[in-house]
Image: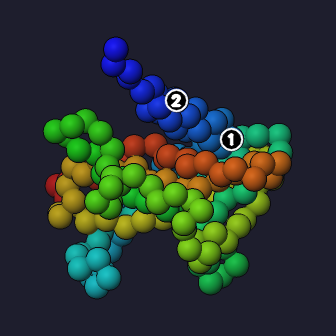
Amino acid sequence: MKRISCLAIPVVMLSFAALASSQRLATFRVTDAHSVPRRADLGLLKYVDWKVTFTITNTTKNGLKVFGSDSGNGSIDPIRYMLDHNQRTNRWEYPNPKNKPTPWRKVSGTQKHVVVLKTGESLTVTREFSREQECGRRVMVTAQIASVKSRKSHELRSDEYQIPCLNQ
């Protein structure tokens, strides 16, 4: 008689449970999008002309830890990944060969600076895009969060956002 392993099922269920848990701790919304003067972004090797603001808001009755890299101005940049939507597979893809987040325990300490948001407090972050080169691109960003009462962190995903085209 052949045995079938069911180990994959609990792992999938846990990842959905973790995602649902993080969504109950906070919201991660697109709160503004507008054009900006066109300029070269040499780090990204493109011209940018569109700015999108993402806001994480603590929706719990307790403090919320938001992790990120130090921005150098007393704040953090909480965006961990920018996911792209693959139309062919209808799935969100991580920007790495394994198409999944790096396990939190393996993430560098430079990405683990913490800001604690009190109930109702928010943290905003912006990203710039090119309406010419990224026209129609569907993106979603992620952040790492945890309740102040928990040692376990969770990935939080933002709303989906589609970059408008230059002529829109």
Outermost residue to the front = 1
The colour scheme used here is rainbow
Residue 66 image position (x, y, % from top left): 67, 59
Residue 129 appears left or right of 89: right
Q: Which residue is mark 1?
A: 25
Q: Amino acid at mark 2?
A: Pro
Residue 141 image point, x, y percent: 44, 54
Callout 2 secondary element: helix
Among the 4 quarters of the image, the one containing residue 41: bottom left
Q: Is residue 34 left or right of residue 132?
A: right
Front residue of 102/77: it is: 102
Residue at 32%, 55% in the rendered image: 98
Q: Are marks 1 and 2 in contact (CB under 8 Å)?
A: no
Residue behind mark 2: 10
Q: Position of residue 116 (x, y in %)?
A: 76, 60
Residue type (three-letter) at the residue carrying disc 1? Leu
Crowd band around label 2 with a 10 angstrom C-alpha radius: few (<14), some (14–19), many (20+): few
Q: What residue is drawn where x is 67% and y is 71%?
A: 113
Q: Front-most of 142 and 41?
A: 142
